[in-house]
Amino acid sequence: MLYQSGSSMDVYWDGEIVSNDTVKIDFFSQALHYGNGVIEGMRAYRTVEGTRIFKAHAHFERLCYSAARMRIPVRHSIQEMINIAYDLLDHRGLREAYIRPMLIAGSQVEMTSPNSSILAMAAWKPNPSVSHSPIQTMLSSFRRPDPSSGFPDAKIVGQYAHSVIALNEARSCGFHDALLLDQSGHLAQATSSNLFVEKDDVLYTPQVGSIMPGITREVVMEMAGQMGVPVCEENLHPDFLKTADAAFLCGTANEILGIQSFNRRPFPTPWEDSIGYAFARKYRQQVTLREGWYSTLI
């Protein structure tokens, strides 16, 4: 797990910063009964210009998009939510943090659009012991939900039950993470990260449809354009990984993380010689606004 939160911390809850020990959610909230809530995950970095939340506007914009998909009312503007995030960081004295905003559907146990919502937000210090070493992955026996069954591009609380199931399976088999197929048997993504595959100096990534098109994924594709690396978005059969040179995952929490092996089959290109490694360095420089590789998390 990339981050560890303490058993007690101050969080933003429905208009004020309080101890999470005092937070109470109504038993009849749709979030408890149906997983009807939406979330985001973003990171704040210590930069030469002070603490900076990377892509804050994009993340809160997506939170609002996800809420609209579920018809959850939003009482705050994007800028107000950004301000709340920075206030919470200041209150907790965090210069670097993982931030988890959430819109929780109100108390309406009927399966209809909620009339209200609660904005909640937590921020905690990244775990300094986290390793950025390449990971071992497996093909999950579970698949991403069919896109016609919901909204795969929205970060809906209930949809992450699939990720929990797939990750538990992978960990029980001795792997760090799992790759999931879509409804047609093509590669989709990892449990909570997007997938990029390297072959012959070209990057391949599953096309939009069944995946969560992540914000970090967009950044990787922008970097590829800047560095002259071709990117192909297409349906990828899992056998494609057998002939690939390297692969990596990307997401807000993991940043850009190399894949050492798939189904215990190592990729031939060492991580330090891969395109993904070069992108990981460039990404880290971009989020921290300074040169350096994997600066100490404080």
Image (cartoon, grey):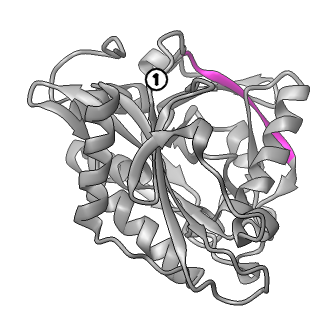
Q: Which image quarter is the C terminus in?
A: top left
Residue 2 as seen in the image, left or right of residue 142: left
Q: Which image quarter is the N terminus in?
A: top right
Report the predominant secondary structure element of the magenta stretch. strand
Residue at the image position 35 percent from the left and 16 percent from the top: 294
Query: Can residue 97 be seen by looking at this rendering?
Result: yes
Residue at the image position 87 percent from the left and 53 percent from the top: 142
Residue 256 as seen in the image, left or right of residue 269: left
Identified by mark 1, the residue type is Pro
In the rendered image, residue 74, in percent from the top left (x then y), is placed at 43, 76
Looking at this view, name the residue that lies furthest to the bottom: 112
Residue that mark 1 sits on? 126
Residue 60 vs residue 239, the one in the foreground: 60
In the rendered image, residue 69, in percent from the top left (x then y), is placed at 55, 81
In the rendered image, residue 12, in percent from the top left (x then y), is placed at 43, 48
In the rendered image, residue 268, in percent from the top left (x then y), is placed at 62, 22
Residue 124 as seen in the image, left or right of residue 236: left
- Residue extent of the magenta highlight: 133-140
Looking at this view, name the residue that lies furthest to the left: 49
Query: Can residue 252 be seen by looking at this rendering?
Result: no
> How many numbered marks does the figure carry?
1
